[in-house]
Image: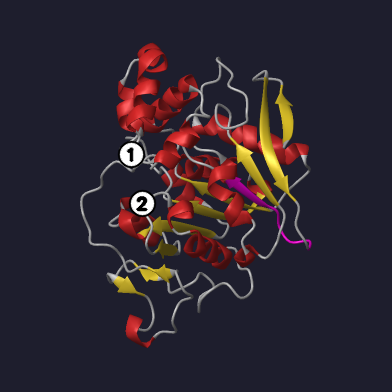
Amino acid sequence: MRELFLAAQRAHIRWIDLPGAGDGPVRVFVHGLGCTAASDFAHIAAHPALGGGRALLVDLLGHGLSDRPADFDYRMESQAAAVAAVLDHLALTGVDLVGHSMGGAVTIHLAASRPELVARLVVAEPNLYGGGGAFSSPVAAMDEKVFVAEGFARLLAVAFRADYAARMRLADPLALHRSAVALVEGSTPAPGDLLAGLKIPRTYLVGQSSLPDPGAEKAAAWGIPVVEIPGAGHNMSLDNPEGFARALGGALGIDGHGGDDGHGGREWDGRHGGYGGDSPGRSAPAPPNVRQSPVPGHRAPTPHRTGP
């Protein structure tokens, strides 16, 4: 574990630095709401599909091993600035940045505000716009003091996944509530608008059980490759680690782990409701456990999920 003291926040942000072979880009992993980087990404960073490169597993402020400053706003832009401080401290530029859920929104803000730091961006079901989701919305609806005093303990008791409760126990209740409020309120500009305008290579990962997914539909319409992880829901790195790692390896352009387009499958063509290029039946097969999804059936936009 390594740490950096952030003077403005009077707090330490902490991360795990996994050494790797070669001189390729460093991979930086950012977790979602109530999670930790090691629990969600350590096994992914070490997977052969990632080619053994160096990886940083960053715990956002208020989560995991990082400090919990009481006067921090826990907004996505502020978390992005804290992660950027880590990269500046390590003199890193041109990293491969990976963010899940809330962490996806954080990484989008980071890539937009500090473009010299990021070479590629991979987001897994990120919060693109305000409105919250199945987890953040009920948390944000509670009074902050009530949630800290009572709601957090009740939430742990009824968590629908034991592994999520285990991760959430390491989060600060105040940080969790303020993060949820920030996700419901959204930010200006919104992560979705920023993602659409980024000029770096971008990939959107989505769990099969999450489909139809409004964010995936938007990403496809923006020309961003969208890769479906079979047998997985929102917690795709835990539900199907093999599929997630292979999809990520393809998105990062690692030799031997992509499909015919370098993304573990075929790209969507959002204009025609199916794959671009040849029909699915005639195209080269994708690697095991990874496939590029056809455009989901259209529906009216709904608030994006937050957390599991």
Q: Which residue is mark 2?
A: 215
Q: Secondary structure at mark 2?
A: helix
In magenta, the rendered stretch is 22-29
Q: Position of residue 220 (x, y in %)?
A: 38, 61
Q: Residues within 10 Å of mark 1 (few under 14, many from 20)?
A: few
Q: Position of residue 255 (x, y in %)?
A: 64, 73
Q: Is residue 283 left or right of residue 59?
A: left
Q: Position of residue 264 (x, y in %)?
A: 49, 71
Residue 112, can we see it? no
Residue 220 among magenta residues:
no
Whole-Å distance between the Cαs marked 2 and 1? Answer: 23 Å
Q: Disc 1 marks which amino acid?
A: Phe
Frontmost residue, 263 versus 156: 156
Q: Disc 2 marks which amino acid?
A: Gly
Residue name at image x 66 percent, y 30 percent: 13
Residue located farthest toward the left when viewing the structure as drawn: 299
Q: Which residue is mark 1?
A: 160
| Residue 188 against residue 261 in the figure, above or below | above
Q: Main secondary structure of the magenta part?
A: loop
Residue name at image x 36 percent, y 53 percent: 233
